[in-house]
Image (spheres, rainbow, N blue to C red):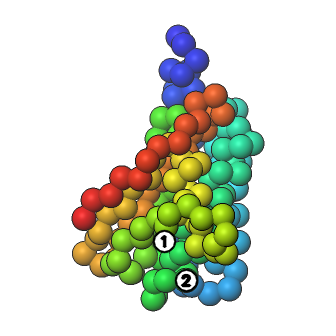
Amino acid sequence: MDGAAHIGDRLREVPVKVSAEYEGIPGDIARGRELARGFLARVRAAQGARVSDRAVDVVQLVVSELLTNACKYAPGPSTVDLELAEDRVEVTVWDSEPVLPVPETPNPDRVGRHGLEIVMAVCQSFEVHREPVGKRMRAAVRLADDLQTAAPLGRSA
């Protein structure tokens, strides 16, 4: 059995999804990062799954950036879902704002508004889907460093 198949077998026995709701109040973003850190620690501990330190940092960063945007631009609640999917973690953030985010042109002189650029640069994939209420943003982060690649934005209405 090759290494990828073995990792997949072990991950099938690990809790594969965690979700949390947020209200856009102070501390939500830190709680979102803690949710990610705790989930990946459980993934590591459950079967010794290969989760790189970089993956833990990237997942926390992605949760932080997407949840920050939800808290800043969307009225009402938001949710964060973290789910194992083969060799990656899918980070999904839903918020009530129907306007789809658009990455700005890279500009090192701009202060702020770099979150979407960052997410797109560090993730394997990123996509946004309009929902009956609001939108759902999904980013995938590889669990192991040697498999980490960046991918372009994918959007659908």
* Mark sitting on residue 79: 1
Which of the 4 image quarters holds residue 33? bottom right
Q: In this figure, what is the number of numbered marks?
A: 2
Residue type highlighted by circle 1: Thr
Residue visible at 70% across and 64% down?
34
Residue visible at 33% across and 78% down?
98
Residue 49 in view here: no
Classed neighbour count for the residue bearing mark 1: other residues with Cα under 10 Å, few (<14), some (14–19), many (≥20): some
Image quarter where the C terminus lies is bottom left
Residue 149 in view here: yes
Left or right of 24 on screen, residue 54: right
Please name the residue that numbered disc 2 is placed on: 72
Q: Secondary structure at mark 2?
A: helix
Which of the 4 image quarters holds residue 11? top right
Q: Nearer the viewer, residue 20 or 120?
A: 120
Left or right of 96 on screen, residue 68: right
Q: Nearer the viewer, residue 47 or 40?
A: 40
